[in-house]
Amino acid sequence: MLEIWSATSDDAPTILAFIRGLAEYEKMPDAVEVNEATLASQLRSTPPPFECLLAEDGERAVGFALLFQTYSTWRGRQGLWLEDLFVLPDQRRRGVGKRLLDRVVSLAKERGCGRVEWSVLDWNQPAIDFYEKMGANVLPDWRIVRITGDALEQLAAAAGQK
């Protein structure tokens, strides 16, 4: 029977395994920098920078959803950003992803959030189809903008932040 629960710092190894599995699926296995100690420490902090839901079928963790709070200036309400949703390949098409997404949406409703948002790679048609079937809108006119690594360091240095 599938159960979903909120992860604790003790679940850091499981979370990291899912993060690595997702990175493999997204063809970016070398992009993972986080480690178990960092995840465990972050989950123990107050408040933690993220929440993680784990799905377990029997004794085996089969999927996860990692999320954090956002804020919409237009709506004047908080929201939730779904950073990652991943189900083990051999567990897909069994309702695990739907159950995880349902729980994220339930959390948003319980907290009075105005929306739940996430991104999806344009080549991941199975995920796009799944999200649209769930009632989500894929926004074609919006693009993610990101500054990381050396560009972040250089920009911060130029702004006087050493």
Image: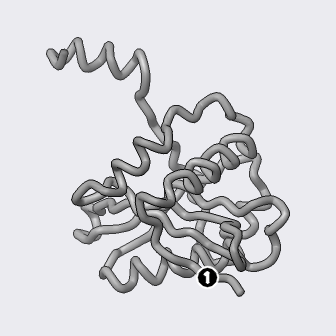
Determine whether, in the image, residue 78 is placed left or right of residue 12. Answer: left
- Residue 84, image x, y percentages: 56, 56
User: Residue at image x 30%, y 81%?
Assistant: 112
**Which residue is more in the foreground, 31 or 145?**
31
Q: Residue at x 59, y 74 (%)?
A: 100
Residue 81 appears anywhere in the view: no
Q: Image quadrant of residue 27?
A: top right
Q: Is residue 18 visible?
A: yes
Kind of residue at disc 1: Glu
The answer to whether 72 appears left or right of 55 in the picture is left
Residue drawn at (41%, 51%) of the image: 40
Q: Is residue 133 above or below residue 137?
A: below
Residue 52 picture location, percent across and down? 47, 63
- Residue 40 or 24: which is nearer the viewer? 40
Q: Secondary structure at mark 1?
A: strand
Determine whether 46 is above or below 56 in the image: above
Give the color scheme: rainbow, by chain, secondary structure or one colour.
Answer: one colour
Q: Quadrant of the N terminus?
A: bottom right
Residue sitting at 17 percent across and 19 percent down? 161
Residue ID for mark 1: 3
Q: Position of residue 106 (x, y in %)?
A: 46, 83
The quadrant of the image that shows the C terminus is top left
Number of on-image labels: 1
Q: Residue 153 placed where, x, y %?
A: 32, 17
Q: Residues within 10 Å of mark 1 (few under 14, many from 20)?
A: some
